[in-house]
């Protein structure tokens, strides 16, 4: 698993070649564990920040320590995910190619990411104004995410055999 993660970072800009199912899902597992740990830490720090603000005055050192730590952890998580964008796209692209699909099939992933951002945008704007989310957005997004997931769990060379 660690070897797969090391290979993930070594192949940062490498869009050629193949990625096996085990390599792909090992990387997804490790990135998910890092993210969950980071988000748990952010929530823990937020809880401590609120508790500190409620229990002591604003100018206490504990308040500032928790606040600075919270900002630092949030910054590090953001940097982690920004640095992960290119290797994640490259490993996903290699996984698509490994199944034997044409390179054009990979368009599913960027479209799904863009639709996810659109859903997030509409969800935040619903409460601020009278903007309503287009009804077709959610089912299309769900179909694309399901298709992406199914492609990534297929064995190597599935579409080469057809």
Image (spheres, helix red, strand yellow):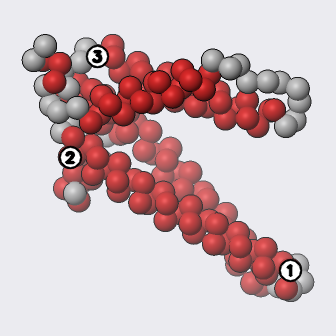
State the image coordinates of residue 70 (x, y, percent, origin top left): 66, 67
Contact between labelled residues 3 and 1, with CB atoms less than 8 Å apart: no
Q: Which residue bears the numbered disc 3?
A: 103
Task: State the CA–CA distance, disc 1 to disc 3.
Answer: 55 Å
- Identified at 12% across, 17% down, the residue is 160
Kind of element beneath mark 1: helix
| Quarter placement of the N terminus | bottom left
Other residues around mark 2 within 10 Å, as few (<14) / some (14–19) / many (≥20): few
In this rendering, is residue 59 above or below 22? below
Q: Earlier in the sequence, mark 1 or mark 3?
A: 1
* 86 sits to left or right of 101: right
Kind of element beneath mark 2: helix
Would residue 59 be visible to someone looking at this image?
no
| Quarter placement of the C terminus | top left
- Identified at 56% across, 66% down, the residue is 40
Query: Can you tell which quarter of the image residue 125 is in?
Result: top right
Q: Which residue bears the numbered disc 1?
A: 54
State the image coordinates of residue 110 (x, y, percent, origin top left): 46, 25
- Identified at 52% across, 63% down, the residue is 38
* 145 sits to left or right of 124: left
Q: Earlier in the sequence, mark 1 or mark 2?
A: 2
Other residues around mark 3 within 10 Å, as few (<14) / some (14–19) / many (≥20): few
Kind of element beneath mark 3: helix
Number of marks in picture: 3
Q: Earlier in the sequence, mark 3 or mark 2?
A: 2
State the image coordinates of residue 135 (x, y, percent, origin top left): 68, 20
Task: State the CA–CA distance, disc 3 to disc 2.
Answer: 21 Å
Residue 22 - label = 2
Other residues around mark 1 within 10 Å, as few (<14) / some (14–19) / many (≥20): few
State the image coordinates of residue 29 (x, y, percent, origin top left): 34, 54
């Amino acid at each position: 698993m660690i070897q797969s993660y090391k290979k993930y970072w070594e192949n940062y800009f490498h869009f050629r070649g193949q990625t096996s199912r085990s390599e792909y899902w090992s990387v997804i597992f490790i990135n998910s564990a890092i993210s969950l740990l980071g988000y748990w830490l952010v929530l823990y720090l937020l809880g401590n920040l609120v508790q500190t603000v409620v229990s002591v005055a604003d100018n206490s050192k504990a308040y500032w320590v928790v606040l600075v730590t919270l900002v630092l952890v949030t910054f590090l998580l953001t940097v982690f995910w920004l640095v992960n964008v290119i290797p994640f796209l490259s490993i996903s692209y290699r996984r698509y190619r490994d199944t034997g699909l044409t390179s054009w099939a990979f368009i599913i992933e960027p479209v799904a990411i863009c639709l996810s951002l659109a859903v997030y945008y509409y969800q935040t704007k619903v409460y601020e104004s009278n903007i309503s989310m287009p009804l077709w957005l959610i089912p299309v997004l769900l179909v694309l995410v399901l298709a992406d997931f199914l492609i990534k769990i297929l064995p190597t060379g599935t579409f080469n055999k057809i």
